[in-house]
Each structure stands twice: as structure tokens, then as C-alpha cells.
Image (cartoon, rainbow, N blue to C red):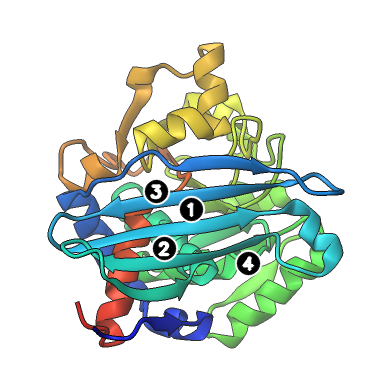
């Protein structure tokens, strides 16, 4: 039996070229997989807010089987630790034989950004060049790189409640060859943007729909619980709305759940998900002037596709 391969963060990062990963995600959504509902478990701690254990399985019959184990412990920030930690276990779907254990945090960052870029392939204007990043966390630079592979991005503006963090991301991206700067005025930045990509932990809207110019694409990556919200009802009213998965976004994403509950958004107004877009079952962008909105909460099919690609590029036996 082949020995179990342990793949660290740097190896995972190097094994997932952005364009190849976006292509692999498009193939995965087109072909499909078995994806049971993710498991959410509350974990009490002796002090602090406690945490959450997430288990996300998926498999392709006769090919690959995998499960991501993620912990979210907000109190870790005070301990000097990352609040989100995790591992991905990749197995053979015919025998159940473990093939590799991959760093789950890096895998998640890479596939999340790639999913946003995949959506932008269908929904952003082909000539989109101004990208605004709302939030300067671990995902922000990944989002910039991913969007820049599918659209001719030549200007990246970053806004964050802590300006120093936005400036740090701008320096990082500038060092990688992207023209980037921190934005002191979020409204002005959004009004000029072709793509607005939000990755925040906000419980209340950060981006107002009235700021979006005709032709803008709004990419919502944060807001992963029904109580969280990154944009307002005006954005939902003005935009053609798409999601990564109907089941996930309709239950977990505040930017979708809350407008559904209030009647601002009807079920029929969610025009498609990544499965339908990848299969050509629904139309993406139809005109240069319309506003599009994409909301993602993540799905295990993305993790499986990314893990398979990483294993292939690292020469891990099937």
C-alpha cells in the first residue's frame, strides 16, 4: 500500500495554478458529484464564544472521495491563532484507501477565489478592468489574482475598516505586478468599479446597491451565515442574481436568506447556480449595462476538485 502523503500549505499553493483550478472547477460543476449536506456542530469551550466544527464530504463514483474537516473558533484571535483551521482527506472512491492529507485552509482559500473567478467568466463584462476588494483578510489577494486571470484587470483598489491592512494587501499585489492601491473612500471606489468583490465578516451591509454602476458585477464571498450581510436590498433589486449552489446559498447566506424572507427576492429571481451556468442551462450576462450579483457560501465539490488537481500535479498515485 502506498504511504499516505502529507501536503503542507506551500505545496498546496504551488500545486493549484489559478487558471487550471478555475478550469477544473468549471469541469466539476459541469460533470457533478455526490455532495451530501455539510455537517455543522457547535463546540463549547471553557471560555470565550466557543467554536464550530464543519465536515464537508464529496465523491465521484469510481474516482475520488474526500472530506474537509474545518474548525472555526473566533476566540483564537486573542490566542494569537488563526480562527479558521482545517485539513482535507483525499481517498480512493473505489477502495476507500487514503491517498493524501492536504492543508485545508490553503485549499479553501484557493478554491473559493477560483469559484468567484469562474462566476465572473459568465457574469462580469468581458472588458472589466477595475476591481475593488472590500475586506483585506486572507482571501483578498487570492480574489485579486483569480479575477485577474479571467478578466483584463489592470487596477485593483482595496478598502478595509483598518486602512493599514488594505495598504499591506496593496503592497503585496503591487509586488506581484498588479497595479493596486488602498481606498480611503469605499463609495467612490465602488461607483467606479467594474467588479466589486466582498470578503468580510460583516453582519450589516457594507456595499450599497445604489453605488453600483451599470454593467457592474458584485461578487459576495463573506456573509456565510443567515445573520450576516455584505450588501443591501437595493443591490438585490437592481441585479440579476446568481449563487454557487441553490441549496447552500438559500439556507446559509444572509445576502440571499434575508431578501427571500422579506419578499425582496423571490425564489424564481435566483436565475442560476454554477452547475447551471457551467452546463449552459441558464444564461449569464446578457448585456453590457446590466448589473450581476453572485453569492457563494462554498461547496464540497470545489474542495474535491481542487484536491484532485493538487494530487495530479504533485504526482500522487490515484
Decide which of tag 2 and tag 1 comes sooner along the chain.
2
Decide which of tag 2 and tag 3 comes sooner along the chain.
2
Q: CA distance from mark 3 to mark 4?
A: 19 Å
- The answer to whether residue 175 of the structure is visible from this angle is yes
Under circle 4, the secondary element is loop
- The answer to whether residue 20 of the structure is visible from this angle is no
265 relative to 226, above or below:
above
Circle on res. 253 = none
Disc number lying in front (2 or 3): 3
Nearer the observer, 110 or 272: 110
115 relative to 105, above or below:
above
Pointer 2 residue: 111
Under circle 2, the secondary element is helix
Rendering coords of residue 220 (x, y %): 52, 45
Pointer 3 residue: 299
Circle on res. 194 = 1
Decide which of tag 3 and tag 4 comes sooner along the chain.
4
Q: CA distance from mark 3 to mark 1?
A: 26 Å
Q: Residues within 10 Å of mark 2 (few under 14, many from 20)?
A: many
Residue at the limit of the structure toward the front, as seen here = 1
Rendering coords of residue 108 (x, y %): 48, 63
Figure quadrant of residue 86: bottom right
Amino acid at each position: 500500500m502506498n504511504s499516505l502523503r502529507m501536503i503542507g500549505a506551500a505545496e498546496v499553493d504551488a500545486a493549484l495554478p489559478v487558471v487550471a483550478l478555475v478550469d477544473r472547477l468549471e469541469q466539476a460543476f459541469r460533470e457533478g458529484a455526490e455532495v451530501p449536506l455539510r455537517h455543522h456542530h457547535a463546540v463549547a469551550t471553557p471560555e470565550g464564544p466557543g467554536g464550530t466544527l464543519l465536515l464537508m464530504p464529496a465523491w465521484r463514483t469510481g474516482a475520488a472521495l474526500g472530506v474537509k474537516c474545518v474548525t472555526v473558533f473566533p476566540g483564537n484571535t486573542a490566542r494569537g491563532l488563526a480562527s479558521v483551521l482545517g485539513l482535507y482527506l483525499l481517498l480512493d472512491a473505489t477502495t476507500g484507501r487514503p491517498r493524501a492529507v492536504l492543508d485545508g485552509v490553503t485549499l479553501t482559500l484557493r478554491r473559493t477565489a477560483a469559484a468567484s473567478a469562474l462566476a465572473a467568466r459568465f457574469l462580469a463584462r468581458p472588458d472589466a478592468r477595475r476591481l475593488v476588494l472590500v475586506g483585506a483578510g486572507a482571501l483578498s489577494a487570492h480574489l485579486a489574482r483569480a479575477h485577474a486571470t479571467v478578466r483584463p484587470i489592470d487596477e485593483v483598489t482595496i478598502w478595509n475598516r483598518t486602512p493599514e491592512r488594505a495598504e499591506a494587501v496593496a503592497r503585496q499585489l503591487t509586488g506581484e505586478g498588479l497595479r493596486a492601491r488602498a481606498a480611503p473612500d469605499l463609495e467612490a471606489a465602488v461607483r467606479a468599479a467594474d467588479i466589486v468583490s466582498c470578503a468580510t465578516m460583516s453582519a450589516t451591509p457594507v456595499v450599497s446597491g445604489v453605488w453600483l454602476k451599470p454593467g457592474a458585477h458584485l461578487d459576495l464571498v463573506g456573509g456565510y451565515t443567515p445573520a450576516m450581510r455584505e450588501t443591501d436590498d437595493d443591490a438585490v433589486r437592481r441585479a440579476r442574481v446568481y449563487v454557487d449552489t441553490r441549496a447552500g446559498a438559500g439556507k446559509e447566506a444572509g445576502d440571499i436568506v434575508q431578501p427571500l424572507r422579506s419578499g425582496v427576492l423571490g425564489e424564481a429571481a435566483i436565475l442560476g447556480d454554477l452547475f447551471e451556468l457551467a452546463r449552459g442551462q441558464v444564461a449569464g450576462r446578457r448585456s453590457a449595462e446590466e448589473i450581476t450579483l453572485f453569492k457563494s457560501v462554498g461547496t464540497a465539490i470545489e474542495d474535491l476538485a481542487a484536491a484532485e488537481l493538487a494530487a495530479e500535479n504533485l504526482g500522487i498515485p490515484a
